[in-house]
Amino acid sequence: MNDYKLNTKYKDRLFRLIFHEKKELLELYNAINKSYYTNPDDLEITTIEDVVYMGMRNDLSFIIGDEMNLYEHQSTFCPNLPLRGLFYFSSVYKAYIEPMKHKLYSTSELKIPFPQYIVFYNGIEEQPERQELKLSTLFIENGKEKAPALECTALVLNVNYGQNKELMERCKTLKEYAQFIDIIRRNLAQGMKHQEAVEQAIDKCIQNDILAEILRKNRSAIMNSILTEWDENEYREFLKEESWKEGHESGKCEGIREGKLDGIIGMVRLCQELQVPQDDALWKIAKAFSLTEEEARHYIAEYWD
């Protein structure tokens, strides 16, 4: 078995590796929109190459017809997707109008492509097949009945194997991508280590003509992408959650046996060790020990090295 060494330099997520070619991207677009474009060159790629999430590139942006499309892959659910989408679209539109920016100040309308934001979710947390996330739900409510000046809607599609079957039947590549990920997860559930699970899944898919051409052509890149993605994202989140539960329980017990302060200190240090953002740590500690936000903030300031 080859020894694939993890490289922390920015990589494409597997989803982006598969769909960055115009042929596969057009197939995906047609499946979502029930359209019948046949020429991949109808796509104009507008992806921003320096946008990185969790150390990896997970986005694809393109114009076709009169639509500006942003496709993004996520293996963890994030309620802030519309805000990220707003920032992304702002950058894409800015680049789009650059050649004609002088028209911004004219008396005639400057027409821009219609935005569409699709998120492809395949995490292990259960999510509906289809849901919309709106930027307006993130605004602080001020009690005034006013329409917000901004809105951005992310359509989140669950692309785990067995979900959104109608969409999968319209896009063979997406279905096979879901099958491939499902095989890896089944291997892991049987106790295989990550590298073995991925190697075996690649071999099995090639033998069964599942993403076969892509896997043969990009085997090394796909191995590196998946191992980085799973080790640095899903697997780390899994360990963090397990460690959090363990630390939470031991912290509570410690607080009961030795005093509440010891439990709080233990949890503060656990959060720091696991690189939990301080804002998240504050909320978790306040909830676990029935503290006010001010009290939790005091303990973090005191014991976070």
Image: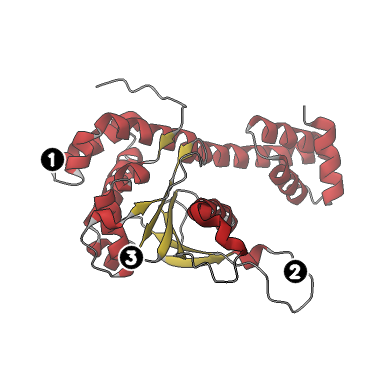
Whichever of callouts 3 and 1 sits on the residue coming sooner in the sequence is: 3
The 10 Å Cα crowd at callout 1, few under 14, some 14 to 19, many 20 or more, is few
Percent coordinates x, y for residue 228 in the rendering: 42, 32
**Callout 3: SS:** helix
The 10 Å Cα crowd at callout 2, few under 14, some 14 to 19, many 20 or more, is few
**Callout 1: SS:** helix
Which residue type does callout 2 highlight?
Answer: Glu
Direction from residue 254 to residue 66 in the image, left or right = left
Task: Give the alpha-carbon distance from disc 1 to disc 2, as whole Å.
Answer: 55 Å
Which residue type does callout 3 highlight?
Answer: Ile
Q: Quick check: 182 above or below 152?
A: above
Kindly identify which numbered label has been placed on residue 207.
1
The residue identified by callout 3 is 32
Percent coordinates x, y for residue 191 in the rendering: 34, 35
What residue is shown at x 42% (from left), y 59% (from top)? 69
Q: In which quarter of the image is residue 175?
A: bottom left
Percent coordinates x, y for residue 230 in the rendering: 42, 37
Q: Which of 280 and 145 is in front in this view?
A: 145
**Callout 2: SS:** loop
The residue identified by callout 2 is 141
Q: Quick check: 81 above or below 243?
A: below
Whichever of callouts 1 and 2 sits on the residue coming sooner in the sequence is: 2
Q: Is residue 259 visible?
A: no
Quadrant (top left, top right, bottom left, bottom right) of the C terminus = top right
Kindly identify which numbered label has been placed on residue 281.
none
Whichever of callouts 3 and 2 sits on the residue coming sooner in the sequence is: 3
What residue is shown at x 30% (from left), y 51% (from top)? 178
